[in-house]
Image: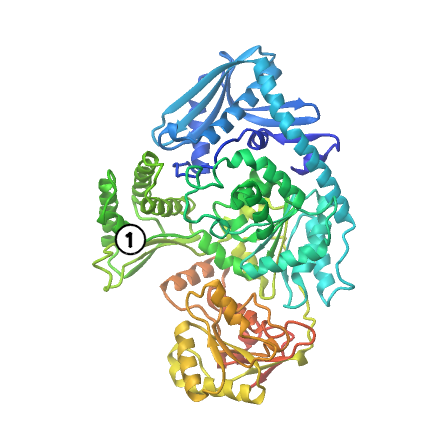
Amino acid sequence: MTAETLTPPDSLQVAVRVLCAFTAQAGDLDLRFTPSPTAQDGVAGHETVTARRPSPYQREVPLRSRCGDLLVQGRADGFDPTTPRLEEIKTHRGDVALVRDNHRALHWAQARVYAWMLCEQLALARIEVALVYFNIDTQVETPLTAWHTADELRQHFHDLCARYLQWARGEQVHRQARDAQLQTLGFPFDGFRAGQRDLAGATWRTHSRGRHLLVQAPTGIGKTMATLFGALRAMPAQGTDKLFYLTAKTPGRQLALHALRRLQPGASAGTLRVLERVAREKACEHPDKACHGDACPLASGFYDRLPQAREEAAQAAWLDQAGLRTVALKHGVCPYYLAQDMLRWSDVVVGDFNHFFDLSAHAWALTVGEPWRVGLLLDEAHNLVERARQMYSAELDPMMLAELRKAPPPGLKASLDRLHRFWGTVGREQAVEQALLSELPDGLLGALQQHSADLAEYLALDAAAPDARVQAWLFEVLHFLRVAEVFGDHSLVEITRPGTAVRTRAPRPRLAIRNLVPAPHLQPRWQAAHSATLFSATLSPMDHAVDLLGLPVDCARLEVASPFDPAQLTVRVTPHISTRFNDRTASLDDVVAVMAAQYRSLPGNYLAFFSSFDYLQLALARFEAAHPDVAVWSQSRGMAEPERNAFVARFTERSQGIGFAVLGGAFGEGIDLPGQRLIGAFIATLGLPQVNPLNEQLRARLQARFGRGYDYTYLFPGLQKVVQAAGRVIRGPDDRGVVVLMDDRFARPEVRGLLPAWWRVEPG
């Protein structure tokens, strides 16, 4: 419910779409592929249909009706007063007969609710109700009509409201109790750590005033607890509906959940509903089955059992992955889609960046559609730049097309061959191995749209057992089209020819849209959020984050001083070593010697970071050959979660040795190795991204936009990785350790200026 739901306290409000989604869906969860329009297509489709209607047809008719103390509001798509006829318009692709039963029931419910509102408002005795399905590809309308008396529609409306009202009253009570508890929320420890009170206070002020805040705060002060405490305390006065705590990696989610547990020990009437969102593949109980009632037992009858599961989940309140799974399986429903439903009814949602910032983010769609007043907390916010670039990029792999053409599904050969020929034309126009274009190739969108329509039609006809190859390829094409729809000077097109070894197998080049500047995509997300706090140990300089993330110009900034004594950390630079690409082989013996000397002088657990797996393997082999008595273990490409856990588990209070890792990888941030589990780090790189044509285009674009192309492309991202990796060493007030920066460039003033101010850097 929104903040308005609670004003006045004895009044309840609900949107028609929410009322019907809550009460009118029944039967199976059915996610068999049906081609669906984008939001933009839907808007355009509605405009096309209503533009066809002659005067005095009315569009977007605002309506409201009261049932007891429940006020229902919405906008009817269209109304013809001469008939009279209410129209509910739904856009689709493919055969209209393939619209799922649960969706059609929802559509009819919405149409009948709007029809009753019109009958009540205009004192109509009867009205024609039309559910108009509009195929956006063929422009064909399929109207389904039925006449209803006002009495029939009133009874239908009251039945839905009666089913919703009990839940809504419970939600109102929960909201009032939640806010009362948050107003007196206490900090769960005897006192604040150094810098933690400043951070909590700044977060409270930011969220109280509806602003955005960028915070750089050192590792170890308790950023997670401070920001959660400040944001939660601000929720009641601001009427905040949801607080989203978003992270880049799984460990960040776990830290947030742990902090939330500490903030509300025990259950009470005002207990926060905390929901953890995880990726669909991690929540799926039957990965070998399709998501529909004929295949998966947790999809069969999903909507029939959802109300009971929702009720228990709301009472349970603590809905981390394990807790929500327990409730879901007890009621025989899918955990992932129960979590998606509970997103509406939770107070704090812990998840990944993509849950709010991705093109198809569900939380973002609800925030705008409801609308909700939301607060955002973004942990390790320095990661959002690169993650957002990935979200707003797309590529098409010619190998997927080639595999389909080897054994084309019935009826698709012509479409596959047509796209193959067009793709070849694009490739011939670019005679170089890699082309970077500022515009989409002529005809590309049209060719892909036609091909996607062909694929969608094929899948719609074979909906019972869809071809997994075709479905996967269609999803790639549709994502590419969605990214292409928002293409602009923030992105470029990359056309890369395959290497000679695979040229005979994949003669077409790889097509990609690479986002370079995510700011234009992210700005609407910041505007939709009532408040946001972004925090990290590495956000210096802050202009870099503000510019690339598109944060508001009045975004507040805070740099929290380190609580650590410089004497806790010895930082040394080795001015005689160069780790530049051309110097690596010659300097390997020096790198190994520095590592060995430090280890011999102070045995214990160390992490050694290198710029690539190739460089790591060279250093590891040289070190093992020279010092076979020292225990070593290393990161490898594509490590699964159990392997990553095993790598970290090697660092114990009593162990000694060196773990070899890649800078910017899984072990450069987000792991906590306090005390003797880690006493030092070797960093044999500045972490600068590779100089290549794509990054040089990025540098040029950033230079043109912000005047700091080299810094924004290479220097700042590289040094952020270095500082993050070094931050693994000192985790608490009693920790002591050493960081060895192995490259002569660390002695340069412009580089030294980007290292934490509390470090005392010594020459090697």
| Residue 113 on image: x %, y % | 57, 22
Image point 43% across, 20% down: which residue? 144
Secondary structure beneath dot 1 equals helix
Name the image quarter holding the C terminus. Answer: bottom right
**Residue lying farthest to the left in this orientation:** 504
Left or right side of 314 for 25 = left
Residue 457 seen in this snapshot: yes
Q: Relative to the observer, which residue lies in front, 232 or 541?
A: 232
Instruction: Give the camera-side residue of 161 and 752.
Output: 161
Q: Give amino acid for label 1.
A: Pro
Closest to the observer: 606 or 354? Answer: 606
The answer, for residue 379, to whether it is visible in the render is: no
On screen, 202 above or below 751? Answer: above
At horizontal 39% and vertical 36% (from top left) the residue drawn is 34
Q: Is the residue marked by circle 1 packed among few (<14), some (14-19), or many (20+) residues within 10 Å?
A: some
In which quadrant of the rendered view does residue 200 lie?
bottom right
> Where's residue 153, x and y in %?
57, 17
Residue at 56%, 37% in the rendered image: 369
The spot of residue 204 in percent (x, y) is 71, 53
